[in-house]
Image (cartoon, rainbow, N blue to C red):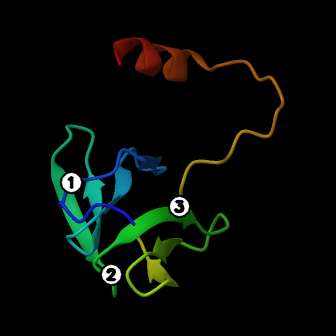
Amino acid sequence: MPQQDGKARMEWHSTRKGCSMLPFLGKGDITVLGLDGQVVRRHPTNDMLPTNLAFALPGKHRIHITEYEHGQMESLAVDCDGLPLWDGRKREMTREAHESTARG
């Protein structure tokens, strides 16, 4: 069983807007962090123990959440899509992406 200590799990899910979303055990929400690490918003869930999330297909603007307390899944509307998954193909990194990565 997941700990119910209210500590965020370190499972970051990045959005196309540069924010990060993570399930927050014991708080019953998906926390959205901005680029500066500050809380931008919280998406309440139906369960106090959300354990993971996955973005829906591009253009759907939804996340799917697994929840431990009631053994269920939930789907929430969000304002953006997640980053695309790596498809195994090697690509050239754009200068902008390289500079952004180098800045940390």
Instruction: Name the quadrant of the N terminus.
Output: bottom left
Residue denoted by label 3: 81
Residue denoted by label 2: 45
Q: Quadrant of residue 70?
A: bottom left
Tell me the kind of residue under disc 3.
Asp
Tell me the kind of residue under disc 2.
Thr
Q: Residues within 10 Å of mark 2 (few under 14, many from 20)?
A: some
Q: Is residue 8 above or below residue 74?
A: above
Q: Is residue 23 visible?
A: yes
Residue denoted by label 1: 7
Tell me the kind of residue under disc 1.
Lys
Q: CA gap, disc 2 to disc 3? A: 18 Å
Residue toward you, 54 or 47: 47
Number of marks present in the image shown = 3
Q: Determine whether the residue tagged by mark 3 lies in a helix, strand or loop.
A: loop
Closer to the chain start, of discs 2 and 3, is 2
**Contact, mark 2 vs mark 1 (Cβ under 8 Å):** no
Q: Is residue 88 above or below residue 27?
A: above
User: Which residue sits at x=23%, y=66%?
Assistant: 4
Q: Determine whether the residue tagged by mark 2 lies in a helix, strand or loop.
A: loop
Closer to the chain start, of discs 2 and 1, is 1
Closer to the chain start, of discs 1 and 3, is 1
